Image: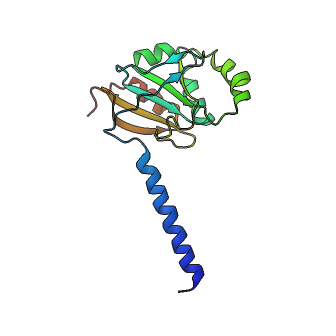
Amino acid sequence: MPYSFKLLYFLVFLVTTSLSAEDENFLNKGDLFPQINFTNQFEKEALLSLNIKKIIFVSDMDASKIAHSVLEKDGDAILNQSEAVFISDIHKMPALITRFVALPKMRSYTYTMHLIRDENVGSNIPRKKGSLTLISLEQGKIKSIEFADEVSKLNEFLSSNPSKKK
């Protein structure tokens, strides 16, 4: 076998094993959702209550737009009624943009945002570019993880009763 084919097979093997290793680091159904020390958009500590049944997680701007379109009017009321929290991973955002542009904009939102500002925090939360990660919990344990790239799926998730799902 020529050297170039051996190298190609080796590279494919490395990429495949590294991708599966990364997948193993993500949270899965049955795992406890980690205790994370969040701050909100007002720079105050924001902890997750054990009563939380749903998590809406975003890690990019496109996903954030989907969530904001649903939560922009009565966000905290919707989240409270659904026993949900909104978590946004903003650690990749440059500090100056965060401080002088993003946070002032976030403070005008009608819902509380639990912010991840450190790349090592929340790195195990599954994510898909352009999609929301919707996590259902029961007593802190993950019941399901879904991805949504449509407003209708987020509305369905927020209106569902997780305790009645099997």
Q: Report the front residue among 109 and 148.
A: 109
Q: Nearer the viewer, residue 50 or 64?
A: 50
Residue 93 in picture, x, y percent from top left: 66, 34
Residue 60: quadrant of the picture:
top right
Q: Quadrant of residue 62?
A: top right
Q: Residue at x 48, y 62 (%)?
A: 16
Q: Position of residue 7 (x, y in %)?
A: 56, 75
**Displayed quadrant of residue 40:** top right
Q: Which residue is located at x 56 percent, y 74 percent?
A: 8
- For the C terminus, give its image quadrant: top left
In the rendered view, would you say 74 is above or below 91? above
* 33 relative to 102 in the view: left or right: left
Tell me how the rendering is colored. Answer: rainbow
Is residue 158 placed above or below 20 in the rendered structure? above
Identity of the residue drawn at 44% across and 33% down: 134
Q: Position of residue 22 (x, y in %)?
A: 47, 51
Nearest the camera: 141 or 118?
Answer: 118
Residue that extends furthest to the bottom in the rendered view of this protein = 1
Residue 154 shown left or right of residue 65 in the figure? left
For image coordinates 51% across by 65% down, the residue present is 14
Total residue callouts: 0
The foreground one among 15 and 138 is: 15
